[in-house]
Amino acid sequence: MGQIVPDAVERYLASLNTLSDPMLQEIERDGTRKNLPIVDAEVGGLLRVLATAVSAKRILEIGTAIGYSGVWLAGALPATGMLLTIEADASRAKLARANFARAGLTDRTTVIVGDAARTLAKVAGPFDLIFQDGDKVQYLSMLDRLVDLLRPGGLLVTDNVLWDGEVVPGFKETLKRRPSDTHAIAEYNRRLSQHPALMSVIVPMRDGLAISVRRSL
């Protein structure tokens, strides 16, 4: 049974997801086979819905991996839109570029290789949607910068905020995640809920998604 959502419920939700396509399914299988960190197809579908809902033209992603979530996001962009995505691992970034090309999204995607915390200082906003799925220890230190880069009414979506339930004290008898990561995510969630520029909610979907909207100035 899943720790956040029971397996039977997850299978039911997966059966209703009609947004995926054979190309996305192939990228997902490749990532799963190589044990790479990629989002679930239902999370991908939610990302595309959210990007569409805010009529996103500029999207920022922290943590490209092999480009799977990026394909979901960039697929919602108009022809003149742009996804800027940052990946620390050069080999994964190379795979991501290949997957963006396979999806016909090369002209709408830019992959930057480097440490996201340093790269963000050079990035110019505003963005309509930001997807945070990078180094968990850096979540909190990046938060204010990401808020600054977000337009009023724009969305900050953060993955893994329930961390297999380990952010909830006493929920699991056996802990498998690094304590430093768990502590960092718990602190991030607390700050997110209290941030004066954001209105946030956590959705218990897969490993937990926080969806935050930047308040009007």
Image (tube, grey):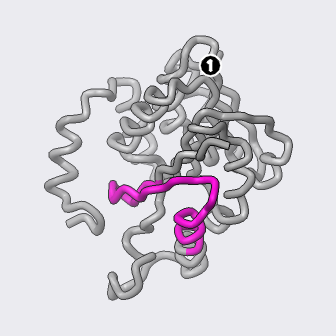
In the rendered image, the vertical position of residue 8 relative to residue 84, given as above or below: below
**SS type, badge 1:** loop
In the rendered image, the vertical position of residue 11 relative to residue 202, given as above or below: above
Residue occupying image coordinates x 43% and y 54%: 209
Determine the residue located farthest toward the top in the rendered image.
79
Which residue is identified by label 1?
A: 81
In this rendering, would 62 be left or right of 168? right
For the magenta stretch, what is the residue range? 187-210
Asked whether 72 or 48 is in front, the reply is: 48
In this rendering, would 80 be left or right of 66? right
Question: Which corner quadrant holds the N terminus?
Answer: bottom left
Asked whether 46 or 194 is in front, the reply is: 194
In the rendered image, the vertical position of residue 107 relative to residue 204, given as above or below: above
Q: Amino acid at mark 1?
A: Gly
Residue occupying image coordinates x 44% and y 29%: 53
Where residue 49 sits, quadrant-wise, is top left
Q: Is residue 191 magenta?
A: yes
Where residue 2 sits, quadrant-wise, is bottom left
Where residue 190 sits, quadrant-wise, is bottom right
Residue occupying image coordinates x 65% and y 68%: 137
Picture coordinates of residue 125, whole percent (x, y) = 75, 35
Picture coordinates of residue 153, whole percent (x, y) = 57, 38
Asked whether 155 or 108 is in front, the reply is: 155
Question: Which corner quadrant holds the C terminus?
Answer: top right
Determine the residue located farthest toward the front in the rendered image.
217
Picture coordinates of residue 172, whole percent (x, y) = 33, 82
